[in-house]
Image (tube, rainbow, N blue to C red):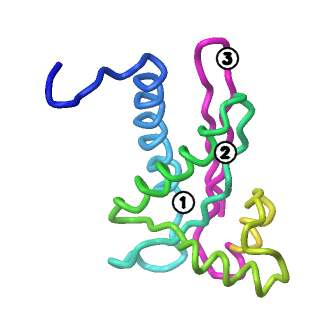
Amino acid sequence: MGGGQRRQTRREQNSDVILDELWVKLRSLLSRQPSPKPQTAEKRVVVLADLANTTNDAAFGATLRQVLAGELGKSAAFSVLSDVHVSQTLRLMVRTPDIKLTPEIASEICERTGSAAVVDGSIIGLGRNYLLSLRARN
C-alpha cells in the first residue's frame, strides 16, 4: 500500500459496520415519530445524550457520540442541538456545562429547548464483538 494509507484493523472494520447499521436504525426510529405540526423544510432538533460505555475502551463513548452527531448533522430531517446551546441550557439549570449528559439530563434539556427528541444509548463488549443500542424518544 502506498501513499501513506494503512489497512484498517478488524476492530475498526467492525466499528464502521456498527456505525453504518446504527445510522440506518436511528433514521428509521426518528422518522417514525409523528410530527405535531405539518411537515416543513425545517429540521427537527434532537438532544444527543452521552452514550453509556461498558467496553473498557474509553475512546468508544466520546468517539461514538461525535460520529453520531456528525451523521445526524448530515440529515435533511434532523440536527443535533449545538454544544453551545446545551451549555447555555445547563447553566440555566444551575449545572456545570461539562456535566455528563445522562438520559435524564438530556430529557430536561430537550424539554427546556423545545427539541423534538432525545437520543441516548449504550455500547457493551461481547467478547470480540460489540453491541450498540440506541433509543430515540420524545
Separation of disc 2 and disc 3 at Cα?
A: 16 Å
Foreground residue, 98 or 31? Answer: 98
Residue 51 falls within the magenta-colored stretch = no
Residue 134 falls within the magenta-colored stretch = yes
Q: Residue furthest top?
A: 127
Q: Residue furthest right?
A: 94
**3 relative position to 63: left or right:** left
Describe the element under mark 1 as helix, strand or loop: loop
Is residue 48 depicted above or below 35 in this figure?
above
Q: Amino acid at mark 3?
A: Leu
Q: Amino acid at mark 2?
A: Gly
Label of residue 126 in the image: 3
| Residue 17 drawn at (x, y percent) | 41, 28
Label of residue 121 in the image: 2
Label of residue 33 in the image: 1
| Residue 117 drawn at (x, y percent) | 61, 65
Q: Specify the segment rendered in magenta.
A: 110-138
**13 relative position to 115: left or right:** left
Point out the image quarter for the N terminus: top left
Lower position in the chain sequence, tag 2 or tag 1? 1
